[in-house]
Image (cartoon, rainbow, N blue to C red):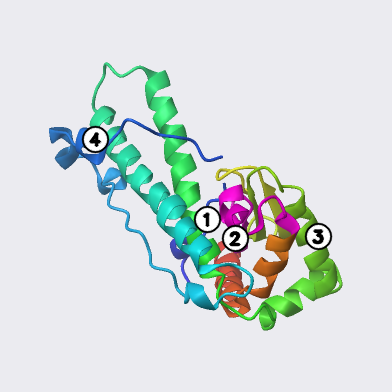
Amino acid sequence: MISRREAIETIALGGASLTFSNLTEAQAQTPLQAAIPNVFAGQHKTKPLPFDPAKLKGISEKLIKSHHENNYNGAVGALNVVEKRLAALIADKETPGYVYDDLKREELVRTGSVVLHELYFGNLGGDGKPGGEVMAAIKAAWGSFEQWESEYRKAAAGLAGGSGWVNFTLNLHTGELHNYWAWDHMHNVPTGVTLLALDMYEHSYHMDYGSAAAKYIDAFMQNVNWEEVNRRYVRAQKALAALRA
């Protein structure tokens, strides 16, 4: 059994990729940084891919590396800059609220992007064959795995040609499983724990498939690491039990 605090810490943020230009880490550093709590430390690190990108089926190594090195790594760097900029302004009484508000929005955008990309890469590298406790839960909620997959695919197809995510999620408020549509990095149900994240931003598939998003969805489903999805589900169930204790 995990504690209530640990349960809350398992909640993943879900959530349009914005450009945060003209700010470098050097510019964000100020003497105030030393007096700011670690919450604005700006020390996030890029996690390596947990699988061999050359072994995915239908998704090229070139695409995965570009996605990881440019989009995900870029989000990590941007989040660090935003945090340090927030740290520099938090004690400045002259900073207008609307300026700080813009940075707080960027903080949420970048945090969501980092979290969701880590979940996305973390649930790739498998054989696409579902199993475990999460499989039984899906059947209980949707009637069959095929019904669940059909809805998940429809939600993904609806984002084709645009941007967003599809997150298979355990709602810790209701205890229900849902496939949630996310227009950008900031959209997810409150208290939602993402079990399977699908990136539908064009950068995740355009290099391989152009505008043929349906082919990318097919390839993604073939590479889902259901062991990881099941691990997340089991952990989320423990969090749910702790929150309801």
Residue 240 at x, y percent in the picture: 60, 65
Q: Does the magenta stretch include residue 78?
A: no
Residue topped by disc 4: 28
Q: Is residue 38 left or right of residue 184?
A: left
Distance Cα–Cα, label 2 vs label 3? 16 Å
Distance Cα–Cα, label 1 vs label 3? 20 Å
Distance Cα–Cα, label 1 vs label 4? 25 Å
Distance Cα–Cα, label 4 vs label 2? 32 Å
- State which region is magenta: 191-214
Disc 4 crowd rating (10 Å Cα; few below 14, some 14-19, many 20+) is some
Residue 176 is at least partly visible in this image: no
Instruction: Look at label 4 and name its amino acid.
Output: Ala
User: Which numbered tag is attached to residue 194?
Assistant: 2
Residue 202 at x, y percent in the picture: 61, 49
Residue topped by disc 3: 151
Q: Which residue is drawn at 46% across and 67% down?
A: 3
Disc 1 crowd rating (10 Å Cα; few below 14, some 14-19, many 20+) is many
Instruction: Look at label 2 and name its amino acid.
Output: Thr
User: Which numbered tag is attached to residue 116?
Assistant: 1
